[in-house]
Amino acid sequence: MSVTQQNKSDLILYAALEQFAENGFHSSPVSQLASLAGVGVGSIYRYFKDKDELIHAVFTMVDDALQKAITASMNPELSGRSEFIQLVTSLIQYLDKHPQEFKFLEQYYSSPYGADKKRAKFLCEGRGGSSNPFVDLFFGNKAKSLKDLPLPLYLAMTFGPIIFLLRDSLSGLVTLDEALIQQTAEASWNAIKAEN
Amino acid sequence: MSVTQQNKSDLILYAALEQFAENGFHSSPVSQLASLAGVGVGSIYRYFKDKDELIHAVFTMVDDALQKAITASMNPELSGRSEFIQLVTSLIQYLDKHPQEFKFLEQYYSSPYGADKKRAKFLCEGRGGSSNPFVDLFFGNKAKSLKDLPLPLYLAMTFGPIIFLLRDSLSGLVTLDEALIQQTAEASWNAIKAEN
DNA sequence: TCCGCCAGAATGAACGTTCAGTCAGTTTTA
DNA sequence: TAAAACTGACTGAACGTTCATTCTGGCGGA
């Protein structure tokens, strides 16, 4: 079986993800990406206009996979508290199991590259239909069980702790076992749920 | 009044803070730092061994100022919930009013430069006596009003949302008025407080 | 043989760092 | 007191290195 074009472009993307996650955009020379991918420097420029375009392509790949994983883990039967905890749990588990993806996304969003995407996500300018399972939950009809807070605060209380914890897990300061993940999801829920 | 040595080193530090916050470490050539500080390139190397040492020096300056501001805002009379909300509030207010400091710290901690400091903060290897007002609160005798959670989770639920919100504030996606800050502090408290 | 694809050497821009020279201020000499 | 000698902080051109990108020669399939 020979290496097809699709294969080669993917080889480059995976090698780039690995290098970017491990060394950052600035410390990942194109020459190094090439040798990790087992490809000549010039070939990278056959598939991607320049390094920037490669970075954006890696983002698209990573973001699609994450989107798919979260959507797949959803259970339409659940509602309110259970749904929230389910979403948080699977997000943490996915990103903890895919540290390269997490490191890449963090770097991407906090760099000039990701500024626009961030705004888009935030304002829910998502694909045509439903935007984001989390935002659906915050705005949907199940929202009765939530305190009435501005959207940015829902997002902050949900994603802030997740990101913080994942970073510590990456640094080896914490082990994200099932119990800790459960406690995290519940604490987040307590932060935003309506008083009983 | 002439420019003293102390002055000049400070000029460099402030210029560096500005450039680093605005453009990042990698996109802040020493030549640019020099011209912003109104100083020859070589002079920077009189006061700092190399660019790395300058970066660490800026961190020390910023961290000291933040430490001082938080400590100054503390009220030993308060306890439990009020103390926590006071701490969170003043941390948010300080960093929102000092966006360059915030951007710098974010960058520093998530770069190889800050890896050690992060671990030190985490393990509370602080100065001799008390380490950190937040950690004191989580461990202190007032802790009865808190759920029994692992320290990393306290930290995640406290600082995660703050960082997330400050980022959005920097991007202009959110305005951090007093009401939102108050809601944030209360939500964080609800996440970690003991059930009533 | 021809054509398209490829690897890696070549290129030039940009960077961190160095260092020889300059000059304002201070001390020494006459 | 005035001139000469000295001092060291300061500058910015120059250096070597590293990078993104381009170019070129050659290899494999048709």
Image (cartoon, coloured by chain):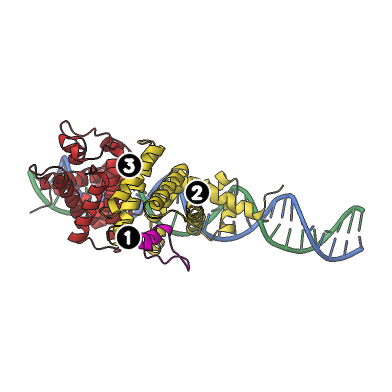
Chain colours: A red, B yellow, C blue, D green
Asked if badges 2 and 1 are on one and the same chain, I answer yes
Which residue is found at the position 19% from the left and 37% from the top?
A: A143
| Chain letter for mark 3 | A
Q: Pick out the residue farthest to the front.
A: B196
Tell me which segment is drawn in magenta. Answer: B122-143
Task: Determine the CA span between mark 3 and mark 1.
Answer: 45 Å
- Which quadrant, please, contains the N terminus of chain A? bottom left
Badge 1 crowding class, 10 Å Cα cut-off, few under 14, some 14 to 19, many 20 or more, is few
Whether pointer 2 and pointer 1 mark residues with C-beta atoms closer than 8 Å, the reply is no
Badge 3 crowding class, 10 Å Cα cut-off, few under 14, some 14 to 19, many 20 or more, is some
Identify the residue under disc 2.
Answer: B17
Which residue is found at the position 57% from the left and 54% from the top?
A: B44
- Identify the mark nearer the N-term, 2 or 1: 2
Three-letter code, disc 2: Leu
Looking at the rendered structure, which numbered label has been put on residue B144?
A: 1
Secondary element type, mark 3: helix
Q: Does the magenta stretch include residue B94?
A: no
